[in-house]
Image (spheres, coloured by chain):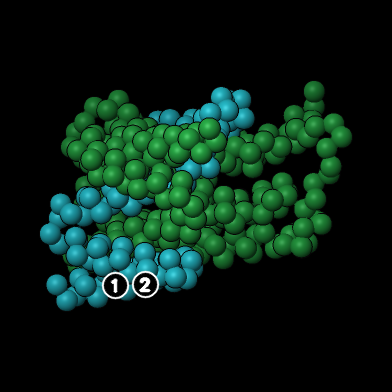
Chain colours: A cyan, B green
């Protein structure tokens, strides 16, 4: 099977995931207990993604310090300003600075 | 049933007309599009470096341009694309590559469920096409900043998703072209982490959200060794269970 076909089938499976609870089985048909926690999906998934990124960076001596600098600076800026653009630019600046210094 | 009827919004009898024109944020048709474009350009600051990394990885693994770019638009999920590239380069069986991509993206199920209320009364064409643009960043932005009226949300969502898709695909192409001349130790992927953090922190507004995030983060670290991104889904589920327990205790 060609790589393009394999990736396209993966994309098709991903589309099915995206579609399932929006169009095929709308989430309002799910049990109430499940629906009560759906507003926490954002904090849960984003925290899991951030922790996974940090965890993977910890395994690479080259990337751990720039990643930690980006996370530290971004967390402070996000908490103080709640401005996404500032947070990203601050994180990018910190990671570049540390990668030059270390 | 005519084609037009099939694509019409599924509005309940007696339900008010779309109040898009009455919402001050959406008085002009272009307002949601401008809002979405601004949000997308901000998010792209964090996504473009990661897209470049995906492009560099694709060129290093000898993934051809058409395979990388042609599928990035349909797959539209960077982490799973990277995992798929790595497995293809390692000679994994096609079914294993497909399963990896689907497992890495399994959290999109939860995003869809959480965002379903914004799609419920939308026309069928939007409920079929709109979910294609569901990624971490569009989910997190639309749930907090997406305008309420249906028509305005449609414009916002499509403009947000398409602007980011163009930026994302362009960044992958850039990575494939400039990859060979880039220094190998550039911390480009740290920007993506900063972007996710920028989306996370403003959501930690109460004890329940904070506990959910802490449990999910702890579970994600504990599950780092799990195969191909399944740790993220497991960690998200653990966080949701913790948040659900707190709300049940609070209400009893």
Marks 1 and 2 on same chain: yes
Front-most of residues B139 and B129: B139
How packed mark 2 is, by other alpha carbons closer than 10 Å (few <14, some 14-19, many 20 or more), is many
Dot label at residue A90? 2
Q: Of all residues shown, which one is farthest toward the front?
A: B252
Q: Position of residue A82 (x, y in %)?
A: 48, 66
Residue at 19 percent across and 33 percent down: it is: B91
Please say if B165 is above or below B9. Answer: below
Say which chain tag 2 marks.
A
For this orientation, the residue located farthest to the right is B14
Q: What separation in Å lies between label 1 and label 2 (alpha carbons)?
A: 6 Å
Disc ID at residue A94: 1
Task: Please state which of residues B22 and B52 is positioned toward the viewer in this rendering.
Answer: B22
Relative horizontal placement of residue A47, taking residue B108 as reference (left or right): left
Residue appearing at x 83%, y 44% in the figure: B17
Measuring 57% from the left and 54% from the top, which residue is drawn there? B144
Q: Position of residue B23 (x, y in %)?
A: 77, 58
- 10 Å neighbourhood of mark 1: few (<14), some, or many (≥20)? many
């Amino acid at each position: 099977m060609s790589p393009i076909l394999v990736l396209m089938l993966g994309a098709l499976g991903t589309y099915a995931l995206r579609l399932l609870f929006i169009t095929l089985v709308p989430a309002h048909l799910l049990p109430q207990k499940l629906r009560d926690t759906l507003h926490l999906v954002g904090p849960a998934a984003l925290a899991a993604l951030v922790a996974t990124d940090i965890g993977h960076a910890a395994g690479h001596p080259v990337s751990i310090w720039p990643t930690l600098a980006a996370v530290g600076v971004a967390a402070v800026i996000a908490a103080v300003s709640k401005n996404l653009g500032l947070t990203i630019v601050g994180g990018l600046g910190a990671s570049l600075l540390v990668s030059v210094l270390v | 049933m005519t084609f037009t009827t099939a694509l019409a919004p599924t509005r309940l009898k007696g339900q008010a007309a779309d109040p898009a024109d009455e919402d001050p944020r959406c008085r002009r048709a272009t307002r949601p599009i401008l809002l979405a474009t601004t949000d997308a350009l901000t998010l792209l600051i964090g996504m473009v470096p990661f897209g470049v990394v995906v492009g560099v990885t694709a060129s290093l693994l000898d993934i051809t341009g058409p395979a990388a770019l042609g599928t990035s638009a349909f797959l539209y999920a960077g982490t799973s694309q990277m995992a798929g590239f790595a497995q293809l380069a390692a000679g994994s069986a096609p079914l294993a590559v497909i399963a990896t991509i689907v497992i890495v993206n399994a959290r999109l199920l939860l995003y869809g469920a959480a965002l379903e209320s914004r799609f419920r009364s939308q026309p069928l064409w939007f409920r079929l096409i709109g979910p294609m643009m569901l990624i971490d960043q569009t989910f997190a932005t639309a749930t907090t900043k997406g305008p309420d009226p249906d028509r305005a949300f449609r414009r916002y969502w499509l403009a947000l998703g398409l602007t980011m898709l163009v930026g994302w695909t362009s960044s992958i192409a850039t990575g494939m072209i400039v990859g060979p001349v880039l220094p190998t130790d550039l911390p480009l992927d740290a920007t993506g982490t900063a972007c996710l953090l920028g989306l996370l922190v403003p959501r930690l507004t109460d004890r329940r959200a904070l506990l959910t995030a802490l449990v999910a983060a702890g579970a994600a670290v504990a599950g780092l060794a799990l195969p191909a991104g399944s740790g993220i889904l497991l960690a998200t589920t653990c966080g949701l269970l913790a948040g659900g327990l707190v709300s049940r205790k609070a209400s009893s």
